[in-house]
Image (cartoon, helix red, strand yellow):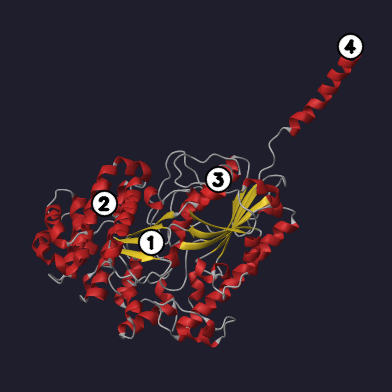
Amino acid sequence: MRFSRLWLGLFAAWLLPGLVKAAEPAKRPNFVFIVSEDNSVHYLRLYGNKLGITPNIERLAAEGLMFNHAFSAAPVCSVARSTLATGMHAPRVGFQYHRKSAPATLPPGVKPWSQVLREQGYYATNNAKTDYNFKVSVKQAWDMSSNKATWRKRTNKSTPFFHMQSFADSHESRLHFPLKQMETPTKTSPDDVVLQPYFPDTPIMRYTKARYYDRMSIIDGHVGRIVSQLKEDGLLEDTFVFYFGDHGGVMPRSKGYAYESGLHVPLVVRIPKNFRHLVDHKRGDRTDGFVSFIDFGPTVLNLAGITPHKELDGRAFLGKGVSAVDLSKRDEVFGHADRFDEKFDMVRTYRKGNWKYIRNYQAYYADGLQNNYRYRQLAYDNWRDLYRANRLNPVQRQFFERRPVEQLFNLKSDPHEVKNLAADPTQAKRLDNMRRLLRNKMKSINDLSFYHENRMVSAALEDGVAFGREHAKQISRLSDLADLALLPFGEAQQALTQALQSKGVLRRYWALKVCTNFGDQAKPLAKAAEPLLKENNLMVRVRAAEFLGSIEAVDPMPTLYRVVNTAETEQAVMIAFNTIVYLRDQVGHKYDPSKVNLKFNKGEVYRRMQYLAGTEPNTNY
């Protein structure tokens, strides 16, 4: 007996190291993001478009999970990618503007989740686009970020990895071609193209859309190549492969606009055989559950067994604790659009199921307000030329005319968002509910766009989240003031009069914007607004000139000339020039470039100067 116990003890001691090793956690999954730039769901056969033939992407879907409702949160790359990299709402942190005039700072302790993966033992690589609107050390966020980055360069082949690969073959710039290009046939026949109802049916429109289908075919080839590399390396069945667009695009009225064409992106996640136990779906499934870019980081971290930072706004949609039934019940998403290059706007959206609500805070600006980069595309110029020649039907004209303050769309019957139901009395209850959902969302995140960019840069970007919390009551009051635009003018007039005379600069600023939204109805407030043309605060002066100029109560240009000539910040000059373009192009006021002597004449300001002087180089003709 003693002999047996002795040998049993020796055997156990010999076996113990093996037992300890066997008890170590199972190896973690790898992740690969394959991203096509400027690409909405509307150009893939997977989503019902027969011309969008992408067999490699379709194969991923057959071996994984396809998302019918994935959204980028913002319809432009820098804002969308900043959201993707952080898992946080851009207007909450302060990185909602494209191109950034100053980077935002993330809250204490919050890092890009690629950096979190690195700190937890992952090898993280990016090939190669970053385009972040927040302060970040790329060397900390990534082991390697360049056009040579690949998972194949990790020194220990057993190290789990996250690799992000972006392809620009579908980017907006690929549709910046000269008129002569149309002599070269596309593989996709322009005759087969079905145009959106808001487009005029012209050869330029048809050729442009056909060319875009051809670009998507190139993207599909890239997807196939990346998957083949994973297979060659023996890694495919250990790797979750995400394919998605970085936001919508890229025909006119998509990229840069908060319609579904700008926000609704394709998303397919291939489920590896060795980690299928982490996902409560069968391969080849589709889900109607709503997911947004704020959710991608928490999802990867959850699949990797890492708890995300408490400040993140998103929720995991795959992995432990996420059932297929729970995911299918998610049916709401928040979207936003602010400044794009030199073009200013403030749009917020809320979608619930098949219903979409859009709130235009500067509804007097037409969607088609000049953005130099957009109008390098022949299709944009072609569309605007026909508008100016009065050759468009009412639906096709919408893009170039002032918008309603709020819009409500039934996406099931109106997928292209051209039939606004906000004034339909049968939808009054639904409109009120959607309005409330959006208002509550904006207040809950302390939406920083209630401060103009000039103020944000000077006061809010060192920690936008903390600034928003500190000023939550003020933001809520400004939101309520802005919502006076939703009332009949007679009900809003007294409150607007008081706000125009308020001691609060931002209250005067927003009251003037609301007045401009009312247009000619607000003419009784012209006398109360006129003293604000000499306001000490330049941004209030700009909004006073904008309102009074829009109703043609005064010539607004002398005030605006003085603002652009004396402003001490680039943001202030840009805001004033946006108003000048609006008043010249949409209202008809005269602009005299000889009256302008700028301190800032480069970047986005220079774009406005070029356009207003008629010297913007047109690469199309």
User: In this rendering, would 58 be left or right of 615?
Assistant: right
Residue hosting label 1: 356
The numbered mark, 4 or 2, whose residue comes first in the sequence reads 4
Tell me, for residue 479, which label it has, or none.
2
Tell me, for residue 322, which label it has, or none.
3
Tell me, for residue 104, which label it has, or none.
none
Label 2 Cα crowd, 10 Å radius (few <14 / some 14-19 / many 20+): some
Label 4: which secondary element: helix
Q: Position of residue 259 (x, y in %)?
A: 40, 65
Q: Amino acid at mark 1?
A: Lys
Disc 4 versus disc 1: nearer the observer: 1
Q: Give the Cα separation between the discs numbered 1 and 3.
A: 26 Å
Q: Is residue 144 above or below residue 605?
A: above
The numbered mark, 4 or 3, whose residue comes first in the sequence reads 4
Disc 4 versus disc 2: nearer the observer: 4
**Residue under the point 52% across and 83% down:** 190
Label 3: which secondary element: loop
Q: Is residue 596 above or below residue 278?
A: below
Q: Give the Cα separation between the discs numbered 4 and 1.
A: 79 Å
Label 4 Cα crowd, 10 Å radius (few <14 / some 14-19 / many 20+): few
Disc 4 versus disc 3: nearer the observer: 3
Q: Position of residue 42 (x, y in %)?
A: 50, 70
Residue hosting label 4: 2
Instruction: Name the one closer to the observer, 308 or 353.
Output: 353
